[in-house]
Amino acid sequence: MAQLQRLAIAPSQLHNEQIMLATEQQHYLGRVLRLREGDRFIAMDGTGNSWLAVFLGNQAQVLESIVVGSELKVPVTLILALPKGNGFDEVVRCCTEIGVSCIVPVLSDRTLLQPSPQKLERWRRIAKEAAEQSERSIIPTILEPIPLNQALATATAKHLYFCVARRHDPHLQTVLPLSTTAEIAIAIGPEGGWTTQEIESAIAAGFQLVSLGNRVLRAVTAPIVAMSLVSAAFDG
Amino acid sequence: MAQLQRLAIAPSQLHNEQIMLATEQQHYLGRVLRLREGDRFIAMDGTGNSWLAVFLGNQAQVLESIVVGSELKVPVTLILALPKGNGFDEVVRCCTEIGVSCIVPVLSDRTLLQPSPQKLERWRRIAKEAAEQSERSIIPTILEPIPLNQALATATAKHLYFCVARRHDPHLQTVLPLSTTAEIAIAIGPEGGWTTQEIESAIAAGFQLVSLGNRVLRAVTAPIVAMSLVSAAFDG
């Protein structure tokens, strides 16, 4: 099944085993992926459901529901201070491939710039494409950017980690639960790190301080490293 | 010490505790980093030696040798099929931050393009900058691109891993030695993966086949994931 092309659809596009294809989806399947009528592909609704389907031009016929089995055993939320420039694109793309469930972009004391709505739309498109390409059955949710304090206050995950550099805290790898099915949330700071006040707020909100190792990682690299460790610990 | 700026120097620049600064190094310290005469910085020779030094314009005075302690306990070599486009820049940058010792770019059956000498020079500059910024004491060696078979034949590491997708091989994380000081080498393929023949050659050369998880990673993401796992296992 792995060689089949993938298409993300909205749940509302599926009725009675027929998928009504939007114009750009018809174009994508027919012109970009070069599928011909009668060719099979995998449709995924981004919430965990996937189907083997046959391309029929402006619609597709569902043949059967399939189990993809490419998701981590636990949902992982990354709370990420927005880096300057376009670095967040790469973070969203890589972390989606590695298995993140939800990304919460946060505004921190050292990165106050509020991104444009176009950026959020762009990140969501990148997450969708990366989920298709990495053969996931879930498209990660990218929330609207919020202040760090709000993200700390609303974090509902059972296991809460707050990554800090230049401190002698335990390595994330050593504190991850050996076995859990409960959500994990990991917060990672901007270039220049969190402020002391932000670290205090995180502790007060129940987050455990952790390290990602003895080298100084860029804000773009750190989330990918953290996600790699969680993914290896909780792969399906 | 962590807040001090860092400068990579060649071992030959140091004589009798004096560092003779090249013109571009003087420019970098004085104009880019805005150091004034008398300010301190950390000089590193890229082979594991670091010194606290005082900037004196066209030279610097060594105050003392310092121990940085930011290197992994084992040397790690990444044997990487060259991706298309400029993706390798990001691989070199991220893997340097995470702690790689040596990168061997390889030409595989599915990526035959021989990169220009300018590219190699560029990757070496990126590795130097990333080593400075991530506060490492070693600058990773970037070898000249060679055919995969040559890289397999000349690999001298004790622990040899060959990452493959879509196969049911053990996860890299589960096969890494629990304790070792011997070199580790990990080979990672191009977009589209290794050919069957390449996989056979790797097995014949003593490499163990491993997986990086249940999702399909891009050639840019896979080395970062592998390096993250090794780094967490062997951090200093």
Image (cartoon, coloured by chain):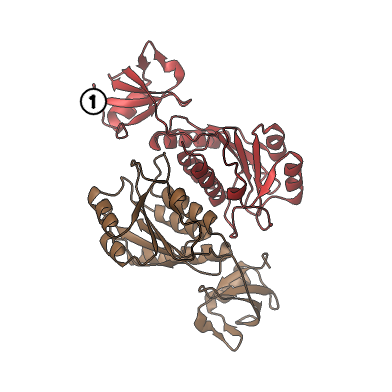
Chain colours: A brown, B red
Which amino acid is tagged 1?
Arg
Q: Is residue A100 above or below residue B2?
A: below
Is any part of residue B114 visible from this angle? Answer: no
Find residue A143 and report its horizontal and vertical position in percent. 37, 67
Please rate how many residues cluster around mark 1, counting C-alpha atoms within 10 Å: few if below 14, some from 14 to 19, many from 20.
some
View extreme (top): residue: B16
- Above or below A216: residue A198: below
For the C terminus of chain A, which image quadrant?
Answer: bottom right
**Residue B168 location, x and y as percent?**
68, 57
Above or below residue A197? Residue A46 is below
The furthest residue to the bottom = A16
Q: Position of residue A228 (x, y in %)?
A: 50, 52
Residue A206 visible to the viewer: yes
Q: Across the whole image, how many numbered discs are drawn on residues?
A: 1
Residue that label 1 marks: B36
Q: Taking B103 as reference, is B59 left or right?
A: left
x, y percent for residue A94: 49, 55
Residue A116 shown left or right of residue B49 in the figure? left
The chain carrying label 1 is: B
